[in-house]
Amino acid sequence: MSLTSASTHHLTDQVAQFHLRFPIDSDDLDQDQEWCEFRIDGEDDWSRIRFHNYHEIYEVPGLYEALFYQCLKCCSPYRVVQLLNDVLMDDPHHMEDLRVIDLGAGNGMVGQELRNVGVQKIVGVDIIPEAREATYRDRPGIYDDYIITDMTDLDESTRQHLRTAEPNCLTTVAALGYGDIPTDAFIEAYNLIDTPGWLAFNIKQDFLDDMEDDTGFAGLVRKLMRKKYIEIHAYRRYCHRLSIHGEPLFYVAMVARKLKPI
Ligand SMILES: C[S@@+](CC[C@H](N)C(=O)[O-])C[C@H]1O[C@@H](n2cnc3c(N)ncnc32)[C@H](O)[C@@H]1O
């Protein structure tokens, strides 16, 4: 787990205080139904938490990091940002020149990784206020601005506000599909960034397979490529994290150049 930044060293002790236990008779649980119980060191009571109830997880300092990053070995913010960094080095472009919208920013893990590789301007966007509160609490200063809005229903003043940041890069990590960010919200965010611009995102591998996909992302990505809206610069399959049974959950990280608006 990356907790190296000076602004987050205080979290290390909080992350260490959690005891976690997982259901053993739950083979048929899909990723968005997974849950666990946690107990804080020195306390007797266990609390149950569903992974998709992000607002409850963000409210407990260090729980998101302990559960997803330390226990289930999530590496996606690091992997997606490193892939973007690699592509820009080959292109060549400078991370320092990026002005990023981080969609589904959560408690700021992606913003932190972007800062680690030199990005100067980052605007976070999330639908739930608890995400911004957790970011301000645990990673203060990581985002220049953090907007709470539903990207599926963006009003004109928020759209204009986001445009004033003159974004030229969109990141979205662990947030597409599964009842989180649907295709129309992705398209809305895509259209906010400059042309040409950069996209760096990940998505569950199954969602890129037409037979498995009910999110619409398989068709959208294929269409964007075929009609030359985007040019793929990197495509990397990797283990996003482990399931509660210790099985690898494979995602694909993609970095693409936006060539024209949709
Ligand atoms: C699994 S978290 C990922 C957080 C962060 N990107 C990371 O990698 O740690 C998904 C985030 O997407 C946010 N989200 C879901 N639907 C959204 C929407 N329609 N608009 C903006 N954010 C949304 C959730 O509130 C949640 O914080």
Image (cartoon, grey):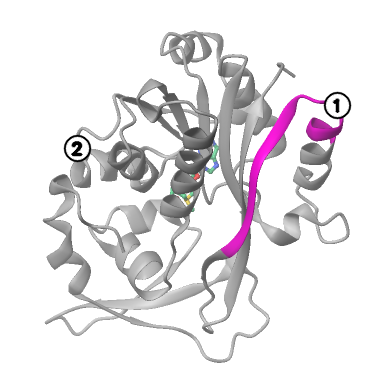
Name the spot of residue 105 as percent of width and height, x first.
42, 40
Name the spot of residue 113 as percent of width and height, x first.
34, 45
241 left or right of 232 in image? left
Name the spot of residue 94 as percent of width and height, x first.
41, 26
Q: Which mark is drawn over residue 140?
A: 2
Give 262 or 5, whichever is nearer the viewer.
5
Q: Which mark is drawn over residue 157?
A: none
Considering only order in the chain, which callout, 2 or 1, is on the residue closer to the N terminus? 2
Determine the CA span between mark 1 and mark 2. 41 Å
Mark 1 C-beta to ligand 1 under 8 Å: no
Q: Residue at x 68, y 81 (%)?
A: 28
**Label 1 sits on what residue type?**
Lys
Q: Which residues are magenta?
A: 223-238
Residue 198 inside the magenta-drawn segment: no
Quadrant of the rendered structure where residue 123 is? top left
State which quarter of the image contains the N terminus: bottom left
State whether residue 218 is above or below residue 262: below
Q: Number of labelled discs? A: 2
Residue 237 inside the magenta-drawn segment: yes
What secondary structure is marked by label 1? Answer: loop
256 left or right of 104 in image? right
Give 2 or 125, whichever is nearer the viewer.
2
Which tag is nearer the camera, tag 1 or tag 2?
A: 1
Residue picked out by circle 1: 227
49 left or right of 58 in image? right
Q: Residue at x 68, y 27 (%)?
A: 187
Mark 2 C-beta to ligand 1 under 8 Å: no
What secondary structure is marked by label 2? Answer: loop
